[in-house]
Amino acid sequence: MKITQKLKDQLWWMIISVDYDYSRISIADHDINDETLTLWLEDKQDFKNSLDECLQLDVKARDFAKIIKSENLNSYEGSKMHPTKNFVYKARIEINTPLKWYQDDASIMEQQWAREATLKAILTQLVETEAAGSYD
Protein backbone atom coordinates (compact mmCIF):
# COMPACT_ATOMS: atom_id res chain seq x y z
CA MET A 1 0.00 0.00 0.00
CA LYS A 2 1.41 3.39 -0.97
CA ILE A 3 1.54 5.96 1.84
CA THR A 4 2.36 9.54 0.85
CA GLN A 5 5.09 11.39 2.70
CA LYS A 6 2.54 13.92 3.99
CA LEU A 7 0.37 11.13 5.41
CA LYS A 8 3.44 9.42 6.91
CA ASP A 9 4.30 12.66 8.69
CA GLN A 10 0.74 13.06 9.96
CA LEU A 11 0.60 9.46 11.16
CA TRP A 12 3.96 9.80 12.92
CA TRP A 13 2.72 12.98 14.59
CA MET A 14 -0.33 11.07 15.80
CA ILE A 15 1.79 8.12 17.02
CA ILE A 16 4.06 10.48 18.95
CA SER A 17 1.07 12.38 20.39
CA VAL A 18 -0.31 9.11 21.83
CA ASP A 19 3.12 8.30 23.34
CA TYR A 20 3.55 5.31 20.98
CA ASP A 21 0.48 3.65 22.56
CA TYR A 22 -1.22 2.48 19.35
CA SER A 23 -4.28 1.29 21.28
CA ARG A 24 -5.10 4.96 21.91
CA ILE A 25 -5.63 5.58 18.19
CA SER A 26 -9.28 5.09 17.37
CA ILE A 27 -11.50 5.42 14.35
CA ALA A 28 -13.83 8.33 15.05
CA ASP A 29 -15.87 7.82 11.90
CA HIS A 30 -15.70 6.22 8.47
CA ASP A 31 -17.14 6.42 4.98
CA ILE A 32 -16.84 4.16 1.94
CA ASN A 33 -17.60 4.51 -1.74
CA ASP A 34 -16.53 2.60 -4.86
CA GLU A 35 -13.09 4.23 -4.85
CA THR A 36 -12.11 4.90 -1.24
CA LEU A 37 -12.51 3.93 2.40
CA THR A 38 -12.08 7.06 4.51
CA LEU A 39 -11.19 6.74 8.19
CA TRP A 40 -11.07 9.69 10.56
CA LEU A 41 -8.60 8.98 13.37
CA GLU A 42 -8.36 10.47 16.84
CA ASP A 43 -6.73 9.89 20.21
CA LYS A 44 -9.08 8.04 22.59
CA GLN A 45 -7.85 10.32 25.39
CA ASP A 46 -8.39 13.52 23.36
CA PHE A 47 -11.73 13.25 21.58
CA LYS A 48 -12.35 15.87 18.91
CA ASN A 49 -15.46 18.02 18.49
CA SER A 50 -15.60 17.61 14.72
CA LEU A 51 -14.18 15.41 12.00
CA ASP A 52 -12.24 18.42 10.71
CA GLU A 53 -10.03 18.10 13.79
CA CYS A 54 -9.36 14.38 13.16
CA LEU A 55 -6.70 12.89 10.91
CA GLN A 56 -8.34 11.84 7.63
CA LEU A 57 -6.93 8.61 6.22
CA ASP A 58 -8.02 7.65 2.69
CA VAL A 59 -7.47 4.03 1.68
CA LYS A 60 -8.03 2.87 -1.90
CA ALA A 61 -10.90 0.41 -2.13
CA ARG A 62 -8.65 -2.19 -3.78
CA ASP A 63 -6.18 -1.96 -0.84
CA PHE A 64 -9.07 -2.32 1.61
CA ALA A 65 -10.23 -5.40 -0.32
CA LYS A 66 -6.72 -6.92 -0.15
CA ILE A 67 -6.69 -6.49 3.64
CA ILE A 68 -10.13 -8.09 4.02
CA LYS A 69 -8.95 -11.05 1.91
CA SER A 70 -5.56 -11.39 3.66
CA GLU A 71 -7.26 -11.37 7.07
CA ASN A 72 -9.73 -14.06 5.83
CA LEU A 73 -12.63 -11.89 6.92
CA ASN A 74 -14.77 -12.70 3.87
CA SER A 75 -14.28 -16.46 4.09
CA TYR A 76 -14.39 -19.38 6.49
CA GLU A 77 -12.78 -22.79 6.70
CA GLY A 78 -15.12 -25.53 5.64
CA SER A 79 -15.41 -28.77 3.77
CA LYS A 80 -15.96 -29.09 0.05
CA MET A 81 -16.81 -32.08 -2.07
CA HIS A 82 -14.51 -32.56 -5.04
CA PRO A 83 -16.72 -32.18 -8.14
CA THR A 84 -15.59 -35.36 -9.92
CA LYS A 85 -13.61 -37.56 -7.52
CA ASN A 86 -16.18 -37.73 -4.69
CA PHE A 87 -13.96 -36.92 -1.73
CA VAL A 88 -14.27 -34.20 0.87
CA TYR A 89 -11.44 -31.77 1.56
CA LYS A 90 -10.92 -28.72 3.76
CA ALA A 91 -10.81 -25.36 2.01
CA ARG A 92 -11.42 -21.66 2.58
CA ILE A 93 -14.91 -20.91 1.37
CA GLU A 94 -15.39 -17.34 0.19
CA ILE A 95 -18.67 -15.79 1.32
CA ASN A 96 -18.46 -13.00 -1.24
CA THR A 97 -15.83 -10.80 -2.88
CA PRO A 98 -14.16 -8.62 -0.21
CA LEU A 99 -15.98 -5.32 -0.86
CA LYS A 100 -19.35 -7.00 -1.51
CA TRP A 101 -18.89 -8.98 1.72
CA TYR A 102 -18.14 -5.76 3.63
CA GLN A 103 -21.13 -3.90 2.20
CA ASP A 104 -23.72 -6.70 1.95
CA ASP A 105 -22.83 -9.61 4.25
CA ALA A 106 -20.70 -8.40 7.17
CA SER A 107 -22.29 -7.62 10.50
CA ILE A 108 -21.61 -4.24 12.10
CA MET A 109 -18.91 -5.88 14.26
CA GLU A 110 -17.29 -7.56 11.25
CA GLN A 111 -17.24 -4.23 9.41
CA GLN A 112 -15.56 -2.67 12.45
CA TRP A 113 -12.98 -5.50 12.52
CA ALA A 114 -12.24 -4.88 8.83
CA ARG A 115 -11.69 -1.15 9.43
CA GLU A 116 -9.51 -1.85 12.49
CA ALA A 117 -7.49 -4.44 10.52
CA THR A 118 -6.92 -1.77 7.87
CA LEU A 119 -5.69 0.75 10.44
CA LYS A 120 -3.42 -1.88 12.00
CA ALA A 121 -2.01 -2.86 8.59
CA ILE A 122 -1.23 0.76 7.73
CA LEU A 123 0.42 1.47 11.09
CA THR A 124 2.40 -1.78 10.87
CA GLN A 125 3.58 -0.95 7.36
CA LEU A 126 4.55 2.56 8.45
CA VAL A 127 6.56 1.38 11.46
CA GLU A 128 8.21 -1.55 9.64
CA THR A 129 9.14 0.60 6.63
CA GLU A 130 10.60 3.37 8.77
CA ALA A 131 12.42 0.89 11.03
CA ALA A 132 13.92 -0.90 8.03
CA GLY A 133 14.92 2.42 6.50
CA SER A 134 16.68 3.58 9.65
CA TYR A 135 19.34 0.86 9.30
CA ASP A 136 20.34 1.70 5.72
Image: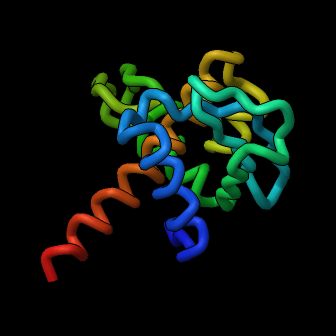
From the viewer's perspective, is residue 57 above or below residue 135?
above
Q: How is the image coloured?
A: rainbow
Q: How many marks?
A: 0
Residue 35 in the image, given as x and y percentages of width and height:
79, 60
- Rendered residue at 46%/38% (across/down): 18
Q: Nearer the viewer, residue 90 or 10?
A: 10
- Rendered residue at 73%/44% (across/down): 54
Q: Residue furthest left?
A: 135
Residue 123 lies left or right of residue 62; in this view the side is left
From the viewer's perspective, is residue 32 above or below residue 132?
above
From the viewer's perspective, is residue 112 above or below residue 132?
above
- Residue 97 occupies which quadrant of the picture? top right
Residue 114 in the image, given as x and y percentages of width and height:
57, 33
Quadrant location of the C terminus in the rendered image: bottom left
Q: Nearer the viewer, residue 66 or 48?
A: 48
Residue 60 lies left or right of residue 16; in this view the side is right
- Rendered residue at 60%/73% (across/down): 6
Residue 69 lies left or right of residue 79; in this view the side is right
From the viewer's perspective, is residue 4 above or below residue 128?
below
